[in-house]
Image: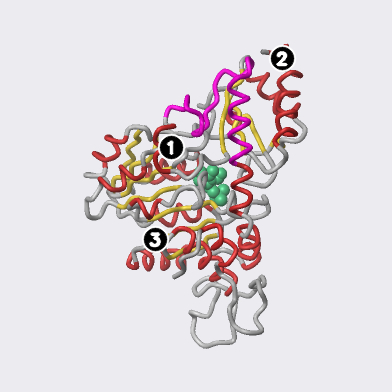
């Protein structure tokens, strides 16, 4: 292992080390290798590019990592390990595709689903005494609730109850759930890890060797392995994770404060604001507050649509965690119709903060008559 700061590890981790090696692992686009046995097949053994990405992520999260073709492939690899009759506990408003996976499995009679408010720490701890899997997502998409991960992970000690944390909105630079006692941490590396909106990838990391083997074999069977090009792009993107997060988080704090003070903004949800309902949780263990927020405009849903259309620099796009800022009217997403009609989810990028503010301010002014 290493004793580097994580901001150094993102630059160092997963590099070839032999004399004459290239500094970076190239994208190795091969299904097969000239070696005997079916383990030398990329769905089972992985490509060297994939293995390098897994080494990089393992050092960041503090465990051993497995890379997947998307965040959802990684989530499914955990859920589909539950035996029939299991109790699965999820947040009241999890990421909508995770909700879909949970609902589908319940309908098929695989498990029963219990939903708990992420802010209700005691309820999560109590549920851990009966559950088989606690699925926590923190900060949550898009309502930005921050669960008290250290309190929950340290209090739930029922053997057989796995605690898995979707830490996509935070990244390992902001929180490391395995250190608090979680069994598995999940990243949609599509987002901040990759950081350039040019790939889909997911990562699971655990410190438990038995669990690692179990997840590894299910990935082999389900076939959700990451491709060589995506692993290359994910490493390349992750090299600047620390720089990007510092800049995006600084931008996010300024913009959240200005939006909160604006008369046309009814509410801002950002863990770095003292007004945020779970700010105290975030301040107690996170290293920074992330670069995601959501805010509600005054006026109607039509005003919210006009606002995202009026912005020029901030892209009206659904994904998040890129170097470029994106925002969307969340209730228009299938599966998110229950969100407030004027809720805008905002992924803050690395542009100059004054350019971002001018863009938002202009879009607010341009739509003021609809407020
Ligand atoms: C919090 C969260 N978890 C999981 C996912 C799923 O990741 P992917 O789109 O890489 O499958 C997303 C995607 O937006 C997300 O925002």
Give the distance between the C-alpha atoms of the residues marked 2 and 3, in whole angstroms.
49 Å
Q: Name the residue under label 3.
A: 206
Q: Which residue is drawn at 60% across and 36% down?
A: 252
Identify the mark nearer the N-term, 3 or 1. Answer: 3
Q: Is mark 3 on a helix, strand or loop?
A: strand
Q: Is mark 1 on a helix, strand or loop?
A: helix
Write down the region rendered in magenta: 249-277
> Residue 368: which numbered mark, if any?
2
Q: Residue at x 60, y 19 (%)?
A: 261
Give the distance between the C-alpha atoms of the residues marked 2 and 1, in whole angstroms.
34 Å
Expressed as whole percent of the image width and height from the top left, the position of residue 200 reads 61, 54
Residue 251 in magenta? Answer: yes
> Residue 283: which numbered mark, if any?
1
Expressed as whole percent of the image width and height from the top left, the position of residue 244 reads 63, 49
With respect to residue 332, does 193 lie above or below?
below
Identify the mark nearer the N-term, 2 or 1. Answer: 1
> Residue 114: which numbered mark, if any?
none
Q: Which residue is drawn at 49% across and 73% down?
A: 44
Residue closer to the observer: 12 or 187? 12
Residue 288 in magenta? Answer: no
Quadrant the C terminus occupies: top right
Q: Is mark 2 on a helix, strand or loop?
A: helix
Expressed as whole percent of the image width and height from the top left, the position of residue 21 reads 65, 81
Say few, some or many: other residues with alpha carbon within 10 Å of mark 1 (under 14 / 14 to 19 / 20 or more): some
Expressed as whole percent of the image width and height from the top left, the position of residue 96 reads 50, 39
Compared across the picture, whether 132 is left or right of 5 comes to left
By what rule are the colours in the image chosen?
Answer: secondary structure
With respect to residue 3, does 262 lie above or below?
above
């Amino acid at each position: 292992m290493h004793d580097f700061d994580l901001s150094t590890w993102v630059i160092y981790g997963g590099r070839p080390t032999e004399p004459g090696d290239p500094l970076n692992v190239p994208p190795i686009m091969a299904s097969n290798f000239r070696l005997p046995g079916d383990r030398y097949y990329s769905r089972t053994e992985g490509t060297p590019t994939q293995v390098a990405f897994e080494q990089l992520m393992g050092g960041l999260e503090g465990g051993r990592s497995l890379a997947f073709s998307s965040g959802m492939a990684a989530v499914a690899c955990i859920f589909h390990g539950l035996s029939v009759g299991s109790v699965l506990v999820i947040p009241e408003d999890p990421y909508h595709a995770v909700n879909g996976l949970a609902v589908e499995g319940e309908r098929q009679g695989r498990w029963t689903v219990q939903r708990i408010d992420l802010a209700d720490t005691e309820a999560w701890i109590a549920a851990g005494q009966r559950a088989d899997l606690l699925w926590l997502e923190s900060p949550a998409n898009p309502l930005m609730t921050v669960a008290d991960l250290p309190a929950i992970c340290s209090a739930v000690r029922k053997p057989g109850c796995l605690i898995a944390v979707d830490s996509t909105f935070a990244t390992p630079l902001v929180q490391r759930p395995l250190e608090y006692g979680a069994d598995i941490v999940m990243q949609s590396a599509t987002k901040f890890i990759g950081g350039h909106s040019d790939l889909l990838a997911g990562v699971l990391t655990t410190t438990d060797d038995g669990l690692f083997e179990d997840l590894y074999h299910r990935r082999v069977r389900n076939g959700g392995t990451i491709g060589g090009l995506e692993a290359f792009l994910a490493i390349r993107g992750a090299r600047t994770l620390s720089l990007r997060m510092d800049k995006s988080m600084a931008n996010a704090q300024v913009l959240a404060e200005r939006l909160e003070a604006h008369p046309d903004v009814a509410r801002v949800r950002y863990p770095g604001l003292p007004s945020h309902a779970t700010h105290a949780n975030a301040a107690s263990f996170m290293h920074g507050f992330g670069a995601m927020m959501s805010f509600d405009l005054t006026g109607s849903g039509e005003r919210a649509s006009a606002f995202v259309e009026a912005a020029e620099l901030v892209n009206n796009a659904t994904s998040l965690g890129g170097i470029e800022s994106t925002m969307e009217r969340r209730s228009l997403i299938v599966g998110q119709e229950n969100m407030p009609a004027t809720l805008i989810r905002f992924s803050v990028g690395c542009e100059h903060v004054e350019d971002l503010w001018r863009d938002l301010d202009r879009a607010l002014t341009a739509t003021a008559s609809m407020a």
